[in-house]
Image (cartoon, grey):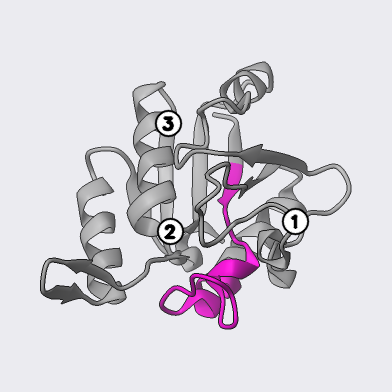
């Protein structure tokens, strides 16, 4: 199998001081960097996906803001692919599938943010398109969520989404196993 690493939305708006900080984004970015370093050493394909909101009422990932920038720990280097997206699913209107297919990629390793949105939707789409997926749990982060009067803490949100993906849509593991 030919593998590719897909880093999804590891952008400043998700970190402390950003417009929509997640729970433990620095730890997730550190684990993502570990995986990124391994892919760089092996010469495997690395794809950085970043979100730009097209909704004028958006509160984060707004065009022209510093929150769009990649976190310093995972900035792309020369030769790495960078794809802009406008939807949670990294395949929607990005050309990602064509790029992967042209490169003969059959297996994706997915890291990034948010576990409950873009990681979930990208992984499910990748699986449905026929890719073998691995999600690196400790290299992903989620927000606290609210449903009615209930606050669901980010660690529980993250665990629930990893549990839902594991075995059905992906193998969910941690960065130590990938490296």
Question: Are discs 2 and 1 less than 8 Å apart at CB?
Answer: no
**Residue 8 horizontal/vertical position (percent):** 55, 51
The answer, for residue 34, to whether it is visible in the render is no
Task: State the separation of the CA atoms marked 3 and 1.
Answer: 30 Å
Query: Which residue is at 69% across, 38% downward?
Result: 83
Instruction: Point out which mark residue 126 bears.
Output: 3
Question: Are discs 3 and 1 less than 8 Å apart at CB?
Answer: no
The one of 39 and 80 positioned closer to us in this rendering: 80
The answer, for residue 130, to whether it is visible in the render is yes
Q: Which residue is under mark 2?
A: 114
Q: Nearer the viewer, mark 3 or mark 2?
A: 2
Q: Name the residue at the front extreme.
A: 57
Query: Which residue is at 50% across, 28% downward?
Result: 92
Task: State the separation of the CA atoms marked 3 and 2.
Answer: 16 Å
Residue 25 on the magenta segment: yes
| Region of the chain picked out in magenta, as a range | 5-31
Query: Which residue is at 43% across, 48% downward?
Result: 118
Label located before the other in sequence (2 or 1): 1
Q: Which residue is under mark 1?
A: 64
Label located before the other in sequence (3 or 1): 1
- Which of the image's four quarters has the N terminus? top right
């Amino acid at each position: 199998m030919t593998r590719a690493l897909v880093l999804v939305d590891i952008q400043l708006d998700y970190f402390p001081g950003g417009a929509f900080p997640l729970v433990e984004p620095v730890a997730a970015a550190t684990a993502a960097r570990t995986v990124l370093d391994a892919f760089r050493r092996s010469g495997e394909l690395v794809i950085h996906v970043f979100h730009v909101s097209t909704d004028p009422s958006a509160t984060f990932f707004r065009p022209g803001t510093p929150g769009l920038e990649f976190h310093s720990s995972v900035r792309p280097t020369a030769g790495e692919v960078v794809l802009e997206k406008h939807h949670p699913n990294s395949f929607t209107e990005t050309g990602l599938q064509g790029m992967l297919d042209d490169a003969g990629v059959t297996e994706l390793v997915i890291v990034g943010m948010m576990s409950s949105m873009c990681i979930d939707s990208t992984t499910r789409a990748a699986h449905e398109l026929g890719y073998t997926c691995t999600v690196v749990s400790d290299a992903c982060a989620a927000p606290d969520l609210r449903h009615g009067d209930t606050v669901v803490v980010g660690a529980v949100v993250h665990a629930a989404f990893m549990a839902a993906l594991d075995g059905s849509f992906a193998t969910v593991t941690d960065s130590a196993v990938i490296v």
